[in-house]
Image (cartoon, rainbow, N blue to C red):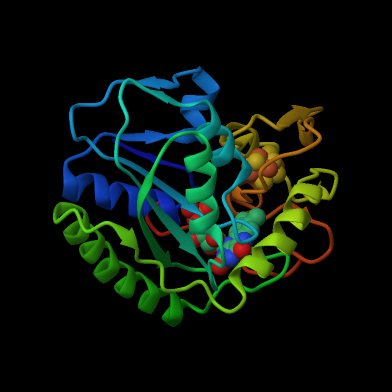
Amino acid sequence: MIFYFSGTGNSRYVAQALAEALDEQLLAIAECLNTGNLEFSLEAAEKVGIVTPVYFYGLPSIVEEFLDKVQFNRSSSMYLVVTFGSFTANTGPHAQKMLSEQGRQLDYLFSIQMPENYVPLFKVPASETRTQLFAEAEKTIAQIVQSLKENKIGDHDTSKGKFPRLVSAVCRQLYRGGMTTKKFWVTEVCTACGLCARLCPVAAISLADGKPSWTKEKCPRCLACLHRCPVEAIQLGHLTKNKERYVHPQLSE
Ligand SMILES: Cc1cc2nc3c(=O)[nH]c(=O)nc-3n(C[C@H](O)[C@H](O)[C@H](O)COP(=O)(O)O)c2cc1C
Ligand code: SF4
Ligand code: SF4
């Protein structure tokens, strides 16, 4: 069983590729939380996979919430595959600690570099770089499949960067304090199509007088609304103006 969360499609692509290669059921974390589908039966020796982007050098808040709530009928081997833009810092070990406090064990950790989507701070990589990242990702996915089939447990994340614990500790504070939706705004090019509201994994957007407004105080900051608006009307503060938007090619098919 593989659970995934994804804002712009990178992690969804990886999760789908793993599910196909391993012949596993694929479930969307946001849908499980929204429908209250949080109890699952596992076959004997069945592994549980979690595929998610790295947010502020840790897990997205929605993934933490899911891991806190999900129940399985038996204990199982778990693996975490994170997609990231630059490096992962302490994401894996932190998830391992969190799960062990819940009486669960994270046996495998993997990471896959994908195009960066945090446009308030960075730029989306150029198209040639994206093509290279996708080609490398294919190889890493094949290695992960092999490792899982061979039951090679352990931490296979080689992209933690320098001072991972310190970096994560500082940035997690920023994430928890900065998940506010107050800085989202919409330019006049909005066509009131409603796509942003339909896509939001936590129903934080409503269409009031035809234009989106953010009705929840906080959200996980997945940036699906900002990247996937067809007319690029959504901005976050003033740092996303004139920045290229990004979705994984599989989402735009
Ligand atoms: C809120 C937010 C925070 C992010 N923080 C990090 C980070 O700490 N380190 C990193 O390498 N990439 C970071 N990224 C980039 C994403 O992890 C990366 O682009 C990921 O592949 C996006 O996955 P998705 O397309 O499935 O949403 C961040 C992206 C977002 C939206
Ligand atoms: S997706 Fe874009 S155009 Fe459509 S309602 Fe939202 S902001 Fe407006
Ligand atoms: S409001 Fe936008 S950034 Fe926040 S969770 Fe919804 S889609 Fe993601």
Occupied quadrant, residue 214: top right
Is residue 75 rendered to the left or right of residue 219?
left
Task: Give the vertical position of 111 relative to 100 (above or below).
Answer: below
Residue occupying image coordinates x 66% and y 43%: 220
Residue at point 42% right, 37% down?
104
Give the side of residue 7 with respect to residue 184, left or right: left
Residue sitting nearer the eye, 133 or 48: 48
- Residue at (56, 63) in percent of width and height: 90
Residue 127 placement, left or right of 161: left
Residue 135 quadrant: bottom left
Q: Which residue is painted at 55% across and 54% down in the image?
A: 94
- In this figure, what is the number of numbered marks? 0
Percent x, y for residue 192? 70, 37
| x and y percentages locating residue 172 in the rendered image | 70, 56
Look at the image and tell me whether residue 67 can be seen: yes
Query: What percent of the width, then of the height, locates residue 54?
Result: 54, 57
Instruction: Locate the N terminus and report the quarter of the image it occupies.
Output: top left
The quarter of the image that holds ligand 1 is: bottom right
Quarter of the view holding residue 236: bottom right
Nearer to the camera, 169 or 24: 169
96 or 202, which is in the foreground? 96
Against 68, residue 115 (above or below) is below
User: Front-most of 209 and 175?
Assistant: 175
Image location of residue 42, percent across then percent down: 25, 26
Residue 253 visible in this rendered orientation of the protein? no
